[in-house]
Image (tube, helix red, strand yellow):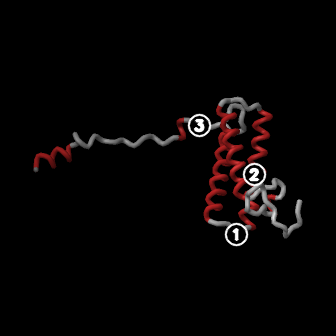
Amino acid sequence: MGKPGEHRSCIPRCKLLVPAELDSVGLCVYHFTWSVEEACAEMHRQVALRKATAERRAEMASYVRECALLLARVTSNLCLSDALKRRILCTFLSLMNLRENLERAPGGHAPELRVPPPELFPTPAVVTDWRNSESNANLRSQV
């Protein structure tokens, strides 16, 4: 790694700086978000096709947590352009969708939906047939 004040490119021909928050991955914000979104798409395919084992889903959940933490650190310490803010929000959305898909997957950790007993539901309101009611018949005869 270079010195703290030294310009460090993330990949060849990239002119963007690698922020200190992303030193561990060695990518600029743009390329980091792009790689996260690509990884999320691949993991989503694995979950959708039910090719992800329980261990793999645990790895995916860990990946989601780590990437979300890194993105949160980036957004809290840097002044970002509107385009990068939009990109980061899209990446957060990809991570959230993946997390939700992991929870919904067979064998996921989503809590079971509990339905309350029927006696706890209020009785439906009685709705009269407005076309055949007496008051409407009187109004129609007056017209």
Residue at 66%, 30% (x, y): give it. Answer: 49
Query: Looking at the rendering, which quadrant does residue 47 occupy?
Result: top right
Q: Count neighbours of disc 1 (C-alpha within 10 A) and say few if under 14, some if 14 to 19, many if 20 or more.
A: few
Out of 111 and 19, give the one closest to the viewer. 19
Quarter location, residue 42: top right
Closer-to-camera residue (17/15): 15
Number of residues whose C-alpha sits closer than 10 Å to that of mark 3, classed few (under 14), some (14–19) or many (20 or more):
few
Which disc is residue 79 wearing?
Answer: 1
**Earlier-in-chain disc, 1 versus 3:** 1
Label 2 element class:
helix
Q: Given this view, does label 1 or label 3 mark the residue nearer the observer?
A: 1
Sequence-first tag of 2 and 3: 2
Q: Nearer the viewer, mark 2 or mark 3?
A: 2
Above-or-below relation of 63 to 29: above
CA gap, disc 2 to disc 1?
A: 19 Å
Residue, disc 3: 115
Residue most extreme to the front: 13
Q: Which residue is mark 2?
A: 67
Query: Can residue 110 be seen in this snapshot?
Result: no
Q: Where, quadrant-wise, is the N terminus in this rendering?
A: bottom right
Q: In screen coordinates, is 38 left or right of 23?
A: left
Mark pair 1, 3: CA separation:
47 Å
